[in-house]
Image (spheres, helix red, strand yellow):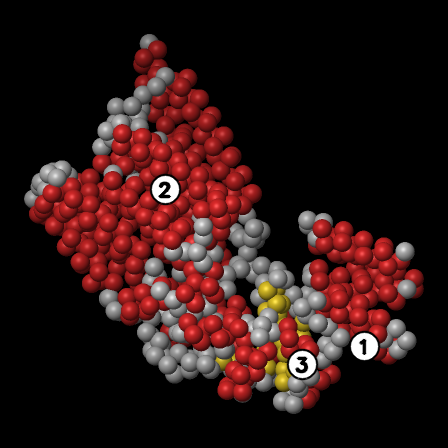
Amino acid sequence: MTDNDREQLTTPGLDLAGWRVVGVFALCSAAYLGLTPTGGWDVWWHMAIGKVAVEHWTTIGTDIFSHSFNGEPWPYKDLIAGIIFYEGFHALGFAWFAILKGLLVLFIMLGAFLVTPTGRRDPLIVLIAGGLAVAAVQYRIVERPLLFSLMLYPVLVVFLERAARRMISPRSIGQMVRPIIPAVLTIWIWALLHRAVLVGLGVFAVHTGLMWIFALRGRVSRRTAAIFTLGLMAAGLLVMCNPGGIHLYTTSFPMAKSEIMREMISDWVRVGPLTLLIDFPVTVALFVAGVVAWITHRLRGGDDSKAGVAHGVLMLLFACFTLADSIRWIPYLSIQSALVLVMALSPGEATASSGSVMFRRARAGMLLVAMIGMCGLMVLRNSFGVGLGEMPDRYPTGAVEFAREHRLGGKVANAFNLGGYLIWEMWPQVLVTIDGRNDIIYPPEYLEKAFRSQHNADVFDEMRAADGVAWVMASNIPGHVTHGFLARNDDWMLVYWSEPALIFVARDDHPKLAEFELSYIDPVAVDVSVVAATAANAGDPEALLHLESQIMRMIKASPMSIRANTAGAIYFHFRGPAYRKQRNELLRMVDLLDTEGSWSQNLHSRLNAIEE
């Protein structure tokens, strides 16, 4: 057997091994990012929508979950997505969320694989570009209908790219129409699942506009441009064939113009170049690499089927929208940049399978190194942890149990982030003030007022005078404590404290809950309030025992809370040598919980200073 014969036999095997590496990476990254604890706030009200729709066979035409807009028209609500989330969760529990998140990873990798023709696919390029895209959108892989938009975006790009390739030269009408149908159907499916389908329509419109430019320059036939135009019109009409209908258009644009929304909602916040570079380095790296590869490819006379003008234009448009509009464009910018990178760097037909056996083996080694590097990047960027179920101390599970046990119902003034969970767990016994349906039910002016009421006593009193709410479920997440001013208001009592949530009740409306009042605790500064209470009651053993019972209730509600354990350690430290054992146990817990060490070090320094 000659060396040439030996190379012909071994090269295909090396290609197959390369794609196996890509496949292993795709499956492993899908499993890893899918198996992250649930921490999304919006998934709960989406599932509540699905549950009501399935159980009562209704599209829920008016708001039923809030007391602030109860009975008001509710035109668009991602109904099908809510049903999918609910039915899957009902059948598989949190494993269903893992499947959906894993599918997003696979869709991105599949898009990177399919966006180029068969003869031009390179496993190393697909792995690196696809892996970087997954890492770039990793922070958005949470339980919400946005998953469907991010899944369908690469699918739409692939279908549009294939349609453009197959309609370069004039053919029969049937042969030219068929390639555009998958893109049109993708838009329709997207509209059923998530209102971000308008992004897809924009992508379709860019392709169509550039087709007309190519047609006028004689690079494609006018029939091709006309078919793209008809496809875009059909897609636009199909968007209205969903439970929200035309309201998908009418409810999206007004909210996009609201400056109040941009100030209040994280998805709408504007981001400057420096912030983009610091907070989203993988996206910036993908974009820069995509731009350089695309420009280089165009200067070398690359054909449009590999990295066409439309894809580069889309990449640049998403970058402009990101910098000028908001961070909600970043996931699409990341995916689009990765797809451009794949198309620009993919080898030509003649070179895709060339190279010596030694060279191909070297590339196989590079594939393994790239796979390890991409996996390491995802582990490094993982801020959610690993495992099924709820993130520890994320949701107000204990607060909900307390509310049920003591029959707190009706209208509640709640923190914005807790509204969805309350809808899922306590509706219809409880009606919320606000929740994550900010751009489809609550007007921006009301949203601003509700946000201000979480930190401004005067605005809170004004809203309570209007709605008569007599209990509050506030956020107690570190750095995001709401309604803290109520701890210093004699008309209200703090009756429940946990790491994720607080419960305040109006004193006159709930006199029976006075025995649960955490009278010494200020949730805004727990440790300071404990120091002050211990010092103020140093000569009153009964008051000190009362304070101790309140602290122990906090620890019981959230055993892994660094703030609660710190409060206990401070209290027992002030009680003197007889309480050193209790203090030291709590200090060890604080040391264990403080992974960065700064909190624990500060606490030890404070206690040592007191002793000295």
The quadrant of the rendering that contains the C terminus is bottom right
User: Toward the viewer: 538 or 158?
Assistant: 538
Question: In the rendered structure, are the residues bearing label 2 and label 3 in contact, judged by CB atoms less than 8 Å apart?
Answer: no
Instruction: Using the image, determine if residue 7 lies above or below residue 544.
Output: above
Please provide percent x and percent y for residue 452.
Answer: 53, 73
Looking at the image, is mark 1 or mark 2 nearer the viewer? 2
The three-letter amino acid code for the residue at tag 1 is His
Q: Mark 1 sits on what residue?
A: 546
Question: Marks 3/1: CA distance?
Answer: 20 Å
Q: Residue furthest right?
A: 577
Residue type at the position of mark 3: Asn
Residue at 41% x, 65% y: name it.
259
Give me the disc on residue 489: 3
Taking the view exactly as shown, the residue that stands out farthest to the top is: 2
Relative vertical location of residue 234 with respect to residue 124 in this rendering, above or below? below
Q: Using the numbered discs, state the Cα–Cα distance from disc 1 to disc 2 in whole angstroms.
A: 60 Å
Please state which amino acid type lies under the numbered disc 2: Ser
| N-term mark: 1 or 2 | 2
Label 2 crowding class (10 Å Cα cut-off): few <14, some 14-19, many 20+? many
Q: Position of residue 549 (x, y in %)?
A: 79, 74
**Which residue is pictured at 38% across the width and 83% down the height?**
71
Q: In the image shown, does 442 or 158 lie closer to the viewer?
A: 442
Image quadrant where residue 109 sits:
top left
Badge 2 is on which residue?
337
From where the camera sits, is residue 156 visible? Answer: yes
Q: Secondary structure at mark 2?
A: helix
Which of the two discs, 3 and 1, labels the residue nearer the N terminus? Answer: 3
